[in-house]
Image (cartoon, rainbow, N blue to C red):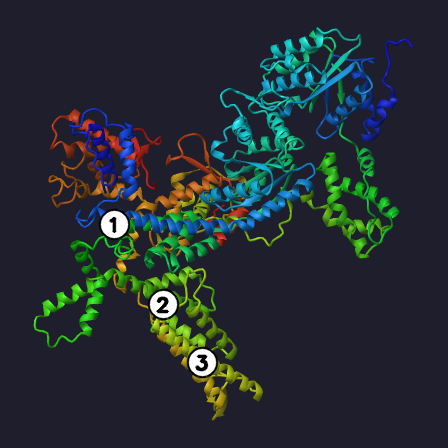
């Protein structure tokens, strides 16, 4: 292996370390480090093939995992995430279609009705720039498909000057036909063979349009807030002046509001704009949609646990207004699941022709908590009174449970998902308040659904208060949930045996109720159950100048009694099927449930300040050296110098006298290091490091002082 | 017929121009005299006047109608404000002159980067070829005072072109008269703003085409000039001093003005009653300040103000920025410290009326002050737990950084001065006004009034 390869491997290792220890004094590595850039072609080829098969996945189970399984995990990750991602992309594209249609209609109409103004569409996209990208991509596709036109996308980051913008526009419109080598633009059209244009001259565009007529030339300012007002005020009148010759139409992506944009433009420019405002779908409503198809749907390969989902949703609401970050959190969860969980391929292993499980796998799954729950259940159910060797029996049961666990776990997962999602839908069918689907799903993922729940009490209460018509509708809906499932959640007809029983019961109840309703109609009475409160009256009596309130229950008619029975039966039947355990208690849920908040938080919400502070305060946790590990607090001379200085820094006020700091530092370090010059060097370096980490800054208020920085 | 030394252009040539552009007879005649080859053609000419007084349009149409029957008059019209650089302007001039002269395209210069090169090209095209005796070429440079990247020598240089090429007339169209020191005398034509009678005469040419409901065509036509006069007195005289804005105001107000007639409340003859009824419309200044949204959205609009678009952290940061911008740093301790009085803050010092002697302008009215980023973060940490239900101590993590980046990219917060964006001591300023901020505050249940000290 050549030394360069070794170096790159070393760097690659550092990438995955929890902490990197910088040790400049250890002068054994000579010269500067080799560049991270790939130097030879050979390494590139090797690494790319390696990445293809395993994506950099490493063997788990203390390295005992066989390469087959490593590869399988990588493959599973790619397959499952690919499926979910394409589904999400489809949904996102679908959600923009209304806006696209509106814009296309406006553009078509505005061409004639705009007079001497320039037609402009202002699309309110929301503050997330990442979601604008997809929208403008789609706009470009749909508008170019609708009419013969060109589409130029401009971003504020590339808009440096008027000339550069015009250059880009002309280049993009004339495509590969422009000669990008010189400053001049050679037109290849017949009559203008000798005519050369400056590359920012819109005349070139005009000549191009003459040879290749277009209906529209769309100029899209993707993030209009980012453009300088002066630049916009230059460009818009210019486009308007050329509009008789070149059919410009402007599109603006607006993140805030058109009023704020208008306030930034000159009045004379505003007068030249013929605009219309369009609202892109806000991320809140997309989120519910994506949540249903990518998180809650019946066939998603990995289920995200309740607490993690809750934190993801909260972050979505509090911090970011964009669906993209939710999608990337989801992707990260998938990555973590398949990267770090050795049990993840168990369910899919038989389908992918993987070999039998290793002994390490079996050991790992026997240690999982859901396995232990299942084992306890088995032991509790079996009769142990006449077993002689308890431990052998125990081992036997565990081995039984472990054999062929993959297919059984898959079956149990399917049952659980089917029950849970249907139960959720049933609960939502009676709910009057419009809680988000995501909220109730998260609740279900955390605690399951149990008859003792608050939600169940509410459910019973609501069903009891229904009148005959509403009850009939409700039962119809429940039957539909169990027989047809739900389109959005990819839920098919139920195949569970207990559900069939429930269905027959419910169908019976429906016929009974319909009959009863008809009967009541012919008799001309209205149906009430005893819960509806129609049969109780409050009576007031005055006895010895005291008011007594008493409730009287009138006797229920025969129909009302029947109605009451039907209501009770319905509730009993449905409640019996609504018992859903929390997902982590399902057999081998570890192989399809991912629920750890910490990795996701570390990646998406890093807190550099906290990390710096902790590592400076307790360097021994990271360095693991002998000199620092002694238990007592306070400044020790053996600590890294920056750490010593940080301890002193913590004791000072907001302005720090550097001379005092130096005296204290010298006193602390001189026990170890005699030479004052060397100590001074150490002091300077430590102070410079504190400054680089953002703890102090130079102060102009007082000479020879530095100021503490607190908030970043 | 012997050609006399001085011969004005035929009135018939001028008639269409005079008709299209009323109230500009004097200017049209002057221009015709100064441009027509047989009259008194001048070398350099400045045409100046404020915007939309008909300078460019009249010059262009006059030249077009003069040049049509006159073979020895050719002209080129170049709009300098549409040229991006000086080189672009020079090349446009060369191109349009070549086009006007039907100069062979192979012979036209491709590059023309400097004034000197322009000079050479023009001499080659205009001076050397043998032409008729009184041949004139008029080069009109429109909006030359708004040319981009123009070197300071450009305008004098262009003005002196005609000294080298005798048959060239250079006409500059400018907003303000420019003293061209190079030539001793430059004739200039001034286009003054239109007066009220002018305006009314022009608008009378474009009366409403359809009679109002409940009124005859004659009545409508009689009503129009009186209405225009009223609009002029209400809006144009004070604020909108240009023909297009006057026209637009009339067009916008006309349907509102005649609405009572259509409803049958008043008759077309009762002008003063109509005027009183439409009084509120005449005070509406949105007529003068047109919105960039011309088409009313067809579907019902979802509320797309800042408070729904921004995530919560970004909103809180924005409020903190507003507080940091509009409160003096000396009040920070009073407002945000929880140190004293067992956690109850001493908010809102009683307004001191005693300081009536030196009245100050309220800080709210003074606009946003710049603030140090650190101070805003400190305010954020102080108010976070009070404004949200989240009991955790506000830590500055990557999400807060992201919210800052969002606000910056939307230009709601702008950096003041130079330096690195990451600099913790950097100064920032909020660029959102009180009205919007109050809405944002209410969206998270905070009355920002309580946190401001005047």
Pick the front one: A270 or A443: A443
Pick the front one: B274 or B75: B75
Q: Secondary structure at mark 2?
A: helix
Instruction: Give me the disc on residue A90.
Output: none
- To which quarter of the image does residue A217 belong? top right
* Residue furthest front in the image: A353
Judging by the rendered image, the residue that carries numbered circle 2 is: A419
Answer left or right for A456 relative to B358: left
Q: Bin the neighbour count of mark 2 within 10 Å (Cα to Cα): few under 14, some 14-19, many 20 and up.
A: many
Q: Secondary structure at mark 3?
A: helix
Evaluate whether label 3 is on the same chain as label 2: yes
Label count reads 3
**Residue B76 shows in this picture:** yes
Q: Bin the neighbour count of mark 3 within 10 Å (Cα to Cα): few under 14, some 14-19, many 20 and up.
A: some
Give the Cα distance between marks 1 and 3: 50 Å
Question: Which quadrant: the N terminus of chain B?
Answer: top right
Tell which tag, 1 or 3, sits nearer the viewer.
3
Give the Cα distance between marks 3 and 2: 21 Å
* Residue furthest bottom in the image: A544
Q: Position of residue A209 (x, y in %)?
A: 62, 30
- Residue at 7%, 73% (x, y): give it: A388
Mark closer to the chain start, 3 or 2: 2
Q: Position of residue B21 (x, y in %)?
A: 80, 30
Instruction: Give me the disc on residue A509.
Output: 3
Pick the front one: A64 or B46: A64
Q: Position of residue A142 (x, y in %)?
A: 55, 44
* Residue furthest right in the image: B1
Instruction: Give me the disc on residue A340.
Output: 1
Evaluate whether label 2 is on the same chain as label 1: yes
């Amino acid at each position: 292996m050549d030394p360069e390869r070794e170096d790159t491997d070393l760097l690659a290792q550092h990438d995955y370390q929890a902490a990197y220890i910088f040790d400049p004094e250890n002068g054994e590595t000579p010269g500067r480090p080799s560049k991270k850039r790939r130097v030879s072609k050979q390494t590139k080829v090797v690494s790319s093939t390696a990445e293809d098969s395993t994506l950099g996945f490493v063997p788990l189970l203390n390295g005992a995992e066989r390469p087959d399984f490593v590869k399988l995990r990588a493959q599973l990750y790619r397959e499952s995430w690919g499926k979910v991602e394409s589904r999400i992309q489809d949904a996102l594209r679908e959600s923009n279609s209304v806006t696209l249609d509106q814009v296309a209609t406006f553009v078509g109409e505005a061409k004639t009705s705009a007079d001497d103004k320039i037609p402009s569409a202002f699309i309110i996209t929301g503050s997330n720039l990442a979601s604008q990208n997809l929208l403008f991509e789609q706009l470009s596709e749909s508008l170019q498909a609708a009419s013969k036109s060109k589409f130029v996308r401009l971003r504020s980051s590339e808009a440096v000057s008027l000339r550069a913008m015009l250059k880009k526009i002309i280049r993009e419109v004339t495509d590969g036909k422009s000669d990008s080598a010189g400053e001049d633009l050679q037109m290849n059209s017949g009559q203008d063979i000798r005519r050369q244009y400056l590359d920012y001259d819109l005349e070139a565009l005009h000549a191009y349009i003459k040879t290749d007529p277009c209906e529209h030339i769309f100029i899209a300012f993707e993030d209009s807030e980012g453009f300088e007002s002066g630049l916009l005020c230059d460009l818009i009148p210019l486009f308007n002046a050329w509009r008789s010759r070149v059919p410009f139409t402007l599109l603006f992506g607006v993140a805030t509001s058109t009023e704020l944009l208008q306030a930034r433009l000159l009045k004379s420019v505003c007068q030249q704009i013929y605009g219309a405002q369009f609202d892109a779908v806000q991320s809140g409503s997309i989120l519910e949609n994506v949540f249903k198809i990518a998180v809650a749907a019946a066939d998603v390969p990995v289920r995200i646990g309740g607490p993690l989902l809750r934190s993801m949703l909260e972050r979505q609401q509090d911090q970011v207004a964009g669906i993209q970050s939710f999608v990337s959190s989801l992707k990260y969860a998938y990555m973590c699941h398949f990267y770090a969980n050795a049990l993840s391929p168990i369910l899919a292993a038989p389908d992918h022709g993987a070999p039998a499980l290793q002994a390490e796998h079996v050991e790992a799954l026997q240690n999982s908590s859901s396995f232990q729950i299942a084992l306890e259940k088995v032991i509790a159910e079996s009769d142990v009174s006449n077993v002689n060797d308890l431990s052998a029996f125990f081992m036997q049961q565990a081995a039984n449970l472990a054999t062929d666990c993959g297919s059984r776990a898959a079956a149990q997962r399917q049952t659980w998902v089917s029950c849970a999602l249907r139960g959720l839908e049933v609960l939502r069918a009676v709910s009057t308040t419009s809680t988000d689907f995501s909220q109730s799903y998260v609740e279900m993922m955390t605690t399951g659904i149990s008859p003792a729940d608050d939600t169940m009490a509410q459910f019973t209460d609501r069903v009891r208060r229904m009148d005959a018509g509403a009850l009939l509708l409700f039962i119809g809906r429940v039957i539909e949930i169990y027989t047809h499932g739900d389109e959005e959640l990819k839920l098919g007809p139920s195949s569970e045996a207990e559900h069939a029983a429930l269905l027959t019961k419910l169908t019976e109840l429906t016929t009974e109720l319909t009959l009863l309703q008809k009967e009541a109609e012919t008799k001309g009475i209205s149906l009430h159950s005893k819960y509806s409160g129609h049969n109780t009256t409050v009576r007031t009596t005055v006895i010895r100048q005291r008011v007594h309130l008493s409730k009287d229950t009138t006797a229920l008619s025969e129909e009302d009694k029947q109605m009451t029975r039907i209501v009770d039966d319905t509730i009993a039947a449905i409640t019996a099927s609504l018992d859903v355990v929390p997902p982590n208690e399902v057999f081998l849920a570890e192989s399809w449930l991912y629920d750890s908040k910490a990795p996701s938080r570390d990646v998406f919400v890093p807190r550099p300040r906290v990390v710096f502070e902790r590592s400076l305060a307790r360097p021994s946790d990271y360095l693991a050296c002998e000199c620092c590990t002694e238990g007592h607090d306070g400044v020790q001379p053996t600590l890294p110098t920056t750490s010593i200085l940080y301890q002193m820094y913590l004791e000072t006020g907001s302005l720090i006298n550097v001379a005092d700091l130096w005296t204290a530092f010298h006193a602390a370090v001189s026990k170890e290091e005699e030479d004052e010059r060397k100590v001074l060097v150490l002091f300077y370096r430590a102070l410079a490091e504190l400054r680089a980490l953002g703890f102090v800054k130079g102060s102009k208020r007082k000479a020879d002082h530095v100021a503490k920085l607190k908030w970043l | 017929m012997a050609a006399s030394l001085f011969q004005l252009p035929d009135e018939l040539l001028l008639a269409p121009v005079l008709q299209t552009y009323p109230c500009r007879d004097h200017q049209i005649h002057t221009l015709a005299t100064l441009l027509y080859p047989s009259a008194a053609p001048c070398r350099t000419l400045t045409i100046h006047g404020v915007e939309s007084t008909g300078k460019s349009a009249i010059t262009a149409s006059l030249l077009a109608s003069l040049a049509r029957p006159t073979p020895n008059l050719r002209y080129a019209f170049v709009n300098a404000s549409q040229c991006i650089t000086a080189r672009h302007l020079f090349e446009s001039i060369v191109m349009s002159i070549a086009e006007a002269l039907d100069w062979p395209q192979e012979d036209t210069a491709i590059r023309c980067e400097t004034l000197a090169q322009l000079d050479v090209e023009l001499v080659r095209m205009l001076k050397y070829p043998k032409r008729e005796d009184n041949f004139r070429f008029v080069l009109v440079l429109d909006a030359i005072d708004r040319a981009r990247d123009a070197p300071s020598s450009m305008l004098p240089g262009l003005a002196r072109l005609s000294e080298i090429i005798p048959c060239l007339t250079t006409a500059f169209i400018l907003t303000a008269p420019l003293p061209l020191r190079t030539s001793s005398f430059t004739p200039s034509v001034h286009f003054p703003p239109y007066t009220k009678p002018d305006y009314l005469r022009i608008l009378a040419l474009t009366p409403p085409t359809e009679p109002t409901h409940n009124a005859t065509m004659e009545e409508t036509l009689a009503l129009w000039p009186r209405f225009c006069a009223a609009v002029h007195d209400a809006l144009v005289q004070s604020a909108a001093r240009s023909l297009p804005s006057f026209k637009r105001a009339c067009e916008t107000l006309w349907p509102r003005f005649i609405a009572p007639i259509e409803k049958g409340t008043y008759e077309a003859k009762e002008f003063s009653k109509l005027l009183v009824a439409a009084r509120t419309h005449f005070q509406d200044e949105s007529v003068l300040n047109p919105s960039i949204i011309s088409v009313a959205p067809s579907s019902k609009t979802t509320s797309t103000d800042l408070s729904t678009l921004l995530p919560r952290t970004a909103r809180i940061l924005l409020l903190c920025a507003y507080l940091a911008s509009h409160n003096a740093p000396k009040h920070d301790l009073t407002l945000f410290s929880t140190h004293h009085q067992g956690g109850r803050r001493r908010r809102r010092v009683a307004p001191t009326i005693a300081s009536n002697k030196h009245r100050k302008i309220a800080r709210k009215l003074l606009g946003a002050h710049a603030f140090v980023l650190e101070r805003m973060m400190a305010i954020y940490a102080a108010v976070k737990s009070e404004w949200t239900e989240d009991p955790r101590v506000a830590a500055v993590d990557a999400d807060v950084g992201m919210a800052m980046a969002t606000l910056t990219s939307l230009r709601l917060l702008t950096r003041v001065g130079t330096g690195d964006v990451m600099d913790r001591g950097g100064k920032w300023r909020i660029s959102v006004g009180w009205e919007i901020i109050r809405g944002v505050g209410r969206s998270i249940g905070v009355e920002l009034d309580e946190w401001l000290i005047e």
